[in-house]
Image (tube, rainbow, N blue to C red):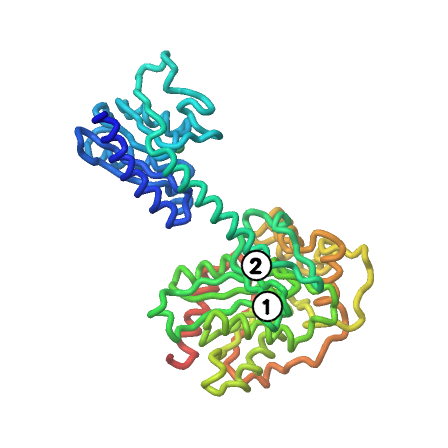
Amino acid sequence: MLSEGRDAAWMQYALAQAQLAFAAAEVPVGAVVVCDGQLIAQAHNQTLQLGDPTAHAEVLALRKAAQVMGNHRLNMCTLYVTLEPCTMCSGAVFQARLSRVVYGAKEAKTGAAGSVVDVFANRQLNHQTEVLGGVLADEAAQLLSDFFAARRHDAAQNQTAHRVPDTALRTPSTAFAASAPEGLYLSTLPATMGMRMHYFMQKTACDEGEGATTWIFLHPLWHWSAWWAPLMQCLVDQGQQVIAPDLIGWGRSDKPKKTAWHTLARHVDAINALLRANQASRCVLVCQDGSEQLAFALAKHLHAHEDGQNNLVQVDAVVQLHCTETAGIWPAPSGATTKKTWRAESYLRSHFASYSNTLKATQMGQSGYAALIQEACAPYPDAGHARNWACTCFDGGGQARCARDALPVPYLALQGHAQRDARTLANALLDWQAHSLPEL
Ligand SMILES: [Zn+2]
């Protein structure tokens, strides 16, 4: 009886740890290690936070306990854990030579103390550990079911908030390689008419970020925001703020079914709204291969509407990176192509043909070049998506182009940019910013 009350009392500590995991959006499992009536160590599941599949509550608690005891053998200790241990944690229990394990709820899918397998019952193992299950099992199970119910609710809400409008296509996330991770989404911008816009963002801590420059990356028209990843990382490493949207029609952003949707004014509105929503007050626009028309138009628009009150977004400069001689045309909705057989890949191959030899000869190499083409084509997995893209950026015609010399802000052109030079390029940008832009 006495031991029963003691077990329940220690399990309360483990449950408190499970609550911490819950609050951190981790699967709520907690564990404590007790020796001689003393609390030695406590931990909760941290697999997401640490990005570590072995960071179960039991393993983390045993690690801490071994540190406290100054010994990897914990013969005199008892482990209290809110959920039946898995095979990995049971293995850790044997390695620590624990005398006793007390757990709460059963785990029907991975439990290794009787539910799926029972490693503790195996008499051939060189160490025997006493096991007791079911201590405060209801509390532990309730916490887990609350957690999974909340997670399902969040997922359902996300689905509704980001429903695909009838006017658009959405590339399934399975089309993207794991190497091209997801960023953030906005689908409430009036400028995008319910279409979901995807973007990457890294901002510095609130106090420091106030009034600091944000680098806005407008991707080349034959790629999407993932193109900027190496350069953005270099800038982020140096404490810079960055935002890189997928323009509506590209990447993970929704793709309007009607090509007429794509006007320069609409894209300017959409980016402007995104910058306001994220309180990017002072911006340097970085563009490449076709997105320069958007950058110029955006800079002119924001400059003209700068009233210091309503418009919080100010453009300080435009940087244009020159990679190719054959820049795309922005935007070109007239004379929409109707070729349903159009494929992004074949288009890109011919588009790149003029300078592909130079590209292949660089450090990027043949395989890097093939991977680049594959990545650029990922958002256009079928003819519907691909046709949409072709209409948008590569057809002839187009609207009135903005002249570069009419630009109301400083302009920098950098030649010979290639992805491999990300660090050098980032340094060049920061150097230029420090010497050519007015002090904040
Ligand atoms: Zn485990």
One can see residue 13 in this view: yes
Residue 272 shown left or right of residue 143 in the figure: right
Q: Quadrant of ligand 1?
A: top left
Nearest the eye: 281 or 151? 151
Identity of the amino acid at label 1?
A: Gln
Disc marking residue 288? 1
Q: Position of residue 30 (x, y in %)?
A: 33, 39
Disc marking residue 354? none
Nearest the eye: 435 or 309? 309
Is 313 drawn above or below residue 186 in the view shown? Answer: below
Q: Mark 2 or 1 closer to N-term?
A: 2
Element carrying mark 1: strand
Nearest the eye: 150 or 431? 150
Which quadrant holds residue 191? bottom right
Which quadrant holds residue 326? bottom right
**Residue reaching furthest to the front:** 1
- Quarter holding the C terminus is bottom left
Tag 2 and tag 1, C-beta contact below 8 Å: yes
Element carrying mark 2: helix
Identity of the amino acid at label 2?
A: Trp
Residue 204 shown left or right of residue 164 in the figure: left
Q: Position of residue 195 (x, y in %)?
A: 63, 65
**Residue reaching furthest to the top:** 124
> Mark 1 near ligand 1 (CB under 8 Å)?
no
Q: Residue at x 37, y 33 (%)?
A: 137
One can see residue 316 in this view: no
Disc marking residue 227? 2
Is 413 drawn above or below residue 107 in the view shown? Answer: below
